[in-house]
Amino acid sequence: MRAHFILLVVVSIAALCATAIPAAAQNRKPTEKEILAVRDCVKARAGTEDGGDSCMFTLVASPCSETPEGKSNLGTADCYRIERTIWDEMLNENYGLLQQELEKNQKDKLRDMQRAWIVSRDRTCEFFQHKIQGSMAVPMEAACLLRETARRALLLKRLEGL
């Protein structure tokens, strides 16, 4: 009887784990098409009042969140993560380009500014976990990280050449 109970518990746990796997977030990188779409959008909006803000969410995250994999909270959060990867790469490129045109003391100030921004971004976005304390906090935090990373990438691009 005890062995039957243990077997039932093990089978139940295995079944729960098996059903949880499809609900897990996607684990993919952005496609070349997605990367080019965001980059082309930003390039087309450079120098406009929008400055590239309208390129956020619309080209990668929103279409991704409409797929079967992207409809859950975890799936939507992962769609935001996929797009954030693109913006993060652009942020790093823009940081490097800006750094190349600065003098030593300005480079130090840029580094300090970025370090402070990273702390601020992370604390701001993680606040959704503290405030919401539920499953909706996951995509809200991911959206915040995407938005703040994209805004920073655009700011660094604007600073270049000033």
Image: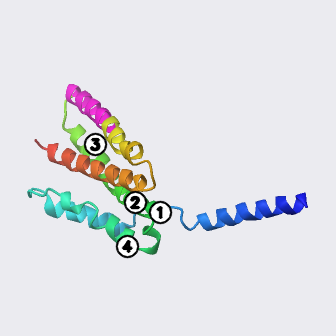
> x, y percentage for residue 69?
47, 70
- Cβ–Cβ below 8 Å for labels 1 and 2? yes
Q: Assess disc 4: are there few (<14), some (14-19) or many (≥20) residues with their C-alpha within 10 Å of its C-alpha.
A: some
Which residues are drawn in magenta?
A: 104-118
Reading the chain from its start, which is encountered first: label 4 or label 3?
4
Q: Residue furthest front?
A: 1
Q: Against 18, is 125 above or below? A: above
Q: Against 64, is 126 above or below? A: above
Reading the chain from its start, which is encountered first: label 1 or label 3?
1
**Dot in front, 4 or 1:** 4
Q: Could you tell me how far apart the alpha carbons at marks 1 and 3 are, in whole angstroms? A: 26 Å
The numbered disc on residue 96 is 3
Quadrant (top left, top right, bottom left, bottom right) of the C terminus: top left
Q: Please, what secondary structure does the residue beneath circle 2 have?
A: helix
Residue 44, quarter of picture: bottom left
- Tag 2 residue: 82
Q: Please, what secondary structure does the residue beneath circle 1 have?
A: loop
- Tag 4 residue: 66
Q: Could you tell me how far apart the alpha carbons at marks 1 and 2 are, in whole angstroms? A: 7 Å
Q: Nearer the viewer, residue 18 or 113?
A: 18
Reading the chain from its start, which is encountered first: label 3 or label 2?
2
Amino acid residing under circle 4: Glu
Majority secondary structure of the magenta segment?
A: helix
Q: Assess disc 1: are there few (<14), some (14-19) or many (≥20) residues with their C-alpha within 10 Å of its C-alpha.
A: few
Q: Assess disc 2: are there few (<14), some (14-19) or many (≥20) residues with their C-alpha within 10 Å of its C-alpha.
A: many
> x, y percentage for residue 82?
40, 60
Reading the chain from its start, which is encountered first: label 4 or label 2?
4
